[in-house]
Amino acid sequence: MDETRSHIIQDLVTQLENDDWLVRYNAAKILGDIDAEEAIQQLLEKLGREDNRDVRRRIVQSLVKIDLNIVIPDLIWIMKSDSSMMVRYTAARALGRMGATEAIPHIMERIAKEKNNESIFWFNLALARLEEDKKGQGIRAIEEMKKKKLLTVKQELEFSKFLKELKQRKKRKK
């Protein structure tokens, strides 16, 4: 079974170099789905060379699915430097979900540079997850966006869901 898995992973890693972006996208997705720790280095290398933002975003999502803390510095770098807003906020969301508190100053720095409300929301939600404080900067910024009616329905639902999760965590800690 291990030999079969190794062959599958190697085939998928090879497909990361395919000319068709959809093949590369699906190869990255499957590597995440099968929790291919063996492919982390190849995914990180491909991330630095990939031109297609959808494939880069999928690689970030796959790295997070594999969920190893060794990718945290890489996610911080991606969040700070990727040319695609979607890839940057996907990395920020992942850092928030992973509880990577070392990313807080980098997320705050990036919020100041973002111009798009969608991106600003996701960065602030990631910050709020890391702060875990109703009076934290992330929650206050999102509440201000909500007052100004800058949130989409999806964002309002995500924020509501997060606040419920935060409340439940606080109850469990008591």
Image (spheres, rainbow, N blue to C red):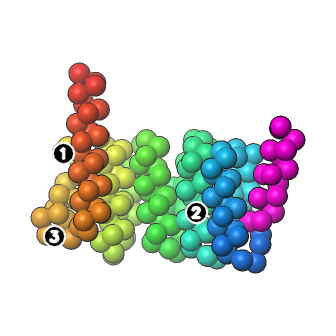
Magenta segment includes 87: no
The image position of residue 60, as x and y in percent, is 57, 58
Principal SS element in the magenta part? helix
- Going 41% across and 48% down the picture, which residue do you hit? 96
- Going 19% across and 65% down the picture, which residue do you hit? 145
**In front of the other: 93 or 7:** 7
Q: Which residue is mark 3?
A: 149
Task: Identify the secondary structure beneath mark 2.
Answer: helix
The answer for how far apart the CA atoms under marks 1 and 2 are is: 33 Å
| Amino acid at circle 3 | Lys
Q: Which residue is mark 2?
A: 58
State the image quarter where residue 140 is shown: bottom left
State the image quarter where residue 38 is shown: top right
- Going 47% across and 52% down the picture, which residue do you hit? 94
Mark 3, mark 1: which one is toward the viewer?
3
Task: Identify the secondary structure beneath mark 3.
Answer: loop
Q: Which residue is mark 1?
A: 135
The image position of residue 72, as x and y in percent, is 55, 48
The image position of residue 19, as x and y in percent, is 76, 78
| Amino acid at circle 1 | Lys
State the image quarter where residue 4 is shown: top right
Q: Is residue 166 above or below residue 12?
A: above
Dot 3 or dot 2, earlier in sequence = 2
Marks 1 & 2, CB-CB < 8 Å contact? no
* Residue stretch in magenta: 1-16
Compared across the picture, whether 25 is left or right of 171 comes to right
Residue 81 visible to an observer of this rendering: no
Mark 1 residue crowding within 10 angstroms, few (<14) / some (14–19) / many (20+): few
The answer for how far apart the CA atoms under marks 3 and 2 are is: 30 Å
